[in-house]
Amino acid sequence: MEQDIKTLTARLLANRWLPRNDRLVRRALVDETFRVELDHRLAAVGLQLQDNPYAGHVAAALVPEMIEPVFGAKREYAASNVGLTRDEIALLVVIWSLIVLPKRERQVTRREVADDGQGDMFGADKPVEHGETVSAGISEASLIADFGPLLGGRSRVKNFMLGKLARLGFIERRNGILAEGPLLDVALDYRVMADRIIHGTLAEVIARAGHPLPETNAFEVADVLPDEDVEEDA
C-alpha cells in the first residue's frame, strides 16, 4: 500500500487532477484505510482530495485554512486564487451554468444527452454516468456572440479568456465546441451555486440570450420518479 499511496499523492501534486476511473483513484474512493492514509499525506502539506461523485475527475485542493497563507499576498486573490479577473470568473460561471446545470439534471434522473425525455422506470437503479453521455458541449461562436459584449468584447473572450480557462482545466475547446474540462465540476460546488443561479439574475440574463436553464435544482426532484408522478395524478 505504501508505494501506491506515494504514487497517487505524487501524481495528484504533479497533475492537479486525475480521472475518476484511474485505478489508484478508484481505490482511494472505495478503500477506507487507503483513503485515510491518502488524506493524511495530503493534509501534511495543506491539501485535501476534492471529490464530487457526479464529476469525472478528482483533484488536489488547498484546505480552507491554507488559502489565505498561500494566496493572500497576490493581487489577483481579491477575485480568484487562480488569477482570474472578475470578467473571467463571470464567463466561467456562465459556462458552468450552461454545461453543468443540465448535466446534473441528467445525472440525477439517470438520463443521457441522446434521450428523448421519456422516463425510464429502471433509471433509479442505474449508476451515475460521467462524460459525454451526460455532459453536452456548447457552441463557442454562440457563447461569444451572446455574452462577449457583456464580458469585455468578443475578441477578448475568444482570444484570451477562453484560452485561459482551457489552460486552467475548466474547459476543453474542440473544433468550435466548448466541452467540460476536468475541473469544471470539481472546483465549482453545485450545491452552493445551483439555487443562486437558477433563482437569480444570471438565469434571466442567460435565458434572454436563448439558453434556458433547468427550472429547479436537480436534487430537489431527484427522488421524484415517473411512477410517483402517475400515482399523484391518479
Image: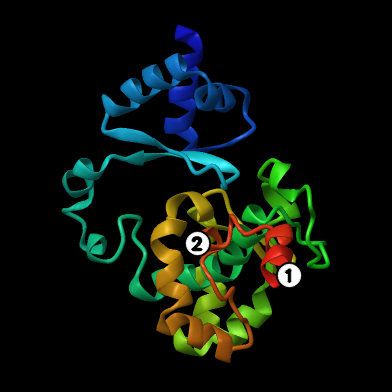
Of callouts 1 and 2, the N-terminal one: 2
Q: Is residue 6 something one can see in this rendering?
A: no
- Where in the figure is residue 152, as x and y percent of width and height? 44, 84
Q: In which quarter of the image is residue 195?
A: bottom left
Q: How crowded is mark 1: few (under 14 residues within 10 Å), some or many (20 or more)?
A: few
Kind of residue sitting beneath label 1: Ala
Q: Which mark is residue 155?
A: none
15 above or below 189? above
- Where in the figure is residue 127, as x and y percent of width and height? 69, 40
Q: Which of 53 and 152 is in front in this view?
A: 53
- Where in the figure is residue 28, as x and y percent of width and height? 50, 24
Tell me the colour scheme of the image.
rainbow
Q: Is residue 202 something one can see in this rendering?
A: yes
Q: In which quarter of the image is residue 202?
A: bottom left
Q: Are marks 1 and 2 in contact (CB under 8 Å)?
A: no
Residue bearing the label numbered 1: 234
Residue bearing the label numbered 2: 165
Which type of secondary structure does the marked residue at label 1 adopt? loop
Tell me what residue is drawn at x 67 percent, y 47 percent.
130
